[in-house]
Amino acid sequence: MALNCGIVGLPNVGKSTIFSALTSAKAEAANYPFCTIDPNFGIVAVPDPRLDKLVEMFKPKRRVPAVVEFVDIAGLVKGASKGEGLGNQFLSHIREVGMIAHVVRCFDDPDIIHVANRISPKDDIEVIHTELALADLETLDKRLEKLQKQLKVQDSAIKKETEKEIAVLTKIRPALESGKPARTVQLDDDEKAVVQSSFLITMKKEIFVCNVDESGLAGNAYVDEVKKAAAEIGSEAVSICGKFEAELSDLESEAERREFLQGIGLEESGLSSLIHAAYRLLGLRTFFTAGEDECRAWTIKAGFKAPQAAGVIHTDFERGFIKAEVYHYDDLIKLGSELAVRQAGKLRQEGKEYIVQDGDVMFFKFNV
Ligand SMILES: Nc1nc2c(ncn2[C@@H]2O[C@H](COP(=O)(O)OP(=O)(O)OP(=O)(O)O)[C@@H](O)[C@H]2O)c(=O)[nH]1
Ligand SMILES: [Mg+2]
C-alpha cells in the first residue's frame, strides 16, 4: 500500500521542477505555462534512518525502502472546468491518488511568468480550490444521474444503498457549488465510506508545497500566507527549493547529505519533510522486516492489526496468519542485537488482535 501523491497547482509555478527534484526523474520544466501535457510518474524511496541502521546491523543482501509515487500533471487555470487553458481532463490522472500536493509559487522572479501577472499565494490557492471543487461537482452530478436511474430497480437492498449514497452526495453538493472542498463537509464514518467510491479529489488530504528559492528556505511572506491557508483547513505546508533538493539528491552518502543540510541550516530535506507531513496527515505507520536476506520498510495505516499488516506483504500471510514475533526497533538499538533482544525477553509472540506499532520489527508465522 505505497502512498501515492498527485501534484496540482497553477501553470508555471514549478510543479515539474519540484517533481524532478524529488524523484530525480527528469520531467520537462520550462518557463512557459502548460509545459507539461502528459503526466509524469516517479517513485521515490521514503527516507528512513531506521532502515539504514537495520541494514548496518543485519548486513542483508537487499535493502528495500518504502516508496511514494508522485504524479505530476498539467497546470490548472481559472475556468479550467469550463475548458480554459488545457481544461481539467488531466485531473483524471490523479483521481485515485491517496493525497494531493498543492504547489504554490512563493518566489519572486520577474523573468518567470505568472499566469495572473501577480504573486499572491492566497489567490492562487483559491483558484485551484475552486477549479478542483467544480471538477468534483461535475463528477458528483454524473454519479447522481446514474444513481437516480438505479433507484428504479426492484431489489430493495440495492435501492437502500443507492438512497444512502444519494443522500450523502446531496449533502456534499452545496459545498462544491460554492467552490469549497468536499472534505469541509462534516460526515460520519458511514457516510465517508459511501463517498470513497466516487473519487472526489477534494475529499483527499491536501498538503501545500511552497516552491521557494534559496532565500525563501528560511521563510518569507508568501510562505506565511500559505501556512495560514493550510492551518485554516487543518493541513500543513512544507517549503521546497527545487535547486537545493536536486543537489541534495545527487549526493551519495548520508553523511554528505547531513553536512549539506546543516550548511543551509535545515534539519531535513524537503522530500522528507513532505513525506513526514503526509504520513502524519494520512495516519500512516512503518513497520520493518529484518533478516540476512532483506531489510525492508512497510507502510500501513495506524490501527492495523497484525494480520492486516501481514497482508501488506502478501495476501497469503493474512489469510493463513498464525502469529507474529515482534520486537521494537528502539529495543534493538538499546540492546545492540536481535539475540540480546531475545535474551532480554523483549521479543514477543502476538496474535490476531495485536495492533502494529510504528517501528515494530515483525516476523510472521503463517500457514496456507
Ligand atoms: N527563479 C526561480 N525559478 C523557478 C523556481 N522553480 C521553478 N522555476 C522556473 O519556473 C519555470 C516553470 O517551472 P515548471 O516546473 O515547468 O512549472 P510547472 O508548474 O510544471 O508548469 P506547467 O507544467 O507549465 O504547468 C521554469 O523556468 C523553472 O525553471 C524557483 O524556485 N525560482
Ligand atoms: Mg509542469
Image (cartoon, rainbow, N blue to C red):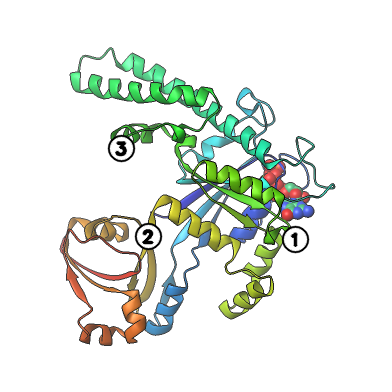
Q: Nearer the viewer, residue 250 or 209?
A: 209
Q: Position of residue 86 (x, y in %)?
A: 67, 32
Q: Is residue 47 visible in the rendered structure shown here?
A: yes
Task: Name the image quarter holding residue 246.
Answer: bottom right
Position of 36 relative to 58 (above/below): above
Which residue is tagged 2? Answer: 285
Furthest toward the top, the residue is 152
Residue kind at label 2, given as amino acid type: Arg
Residue kind at label 1, given as amino acid type: Ser
Determine whether, in the image, residue 78 is placed left or right of residue 343: right
Which residue is tagged 3? Answer: 189
- How far is disc 3 from disc 1 in space, using C-alphas? 44 Å
Classify mark 2: residues with Cα within 10 Å, few (<14), some (14-19) or many (20+): many
Asked which secondary structure carries label 3, the reply is helix
- How far is disc 2 from disc 1 in space, using C-alphas? 33 Å
Position of 162 relative to 221 (above/below): above
**Dots 2, 1 in contact, CB < 8 A:** no
Determine whether, in the image, residue 311 is placed left or right of residue 207: left
Q: Position of residue 203 (x, y in %)?
A: 45, 37
Image mark for residue 215: 1
- How far is disc 2 from disc 3 in space, using C-alphas? 21 Å
Q: Nearer the viewer, residue 155 or 275?
A: 275
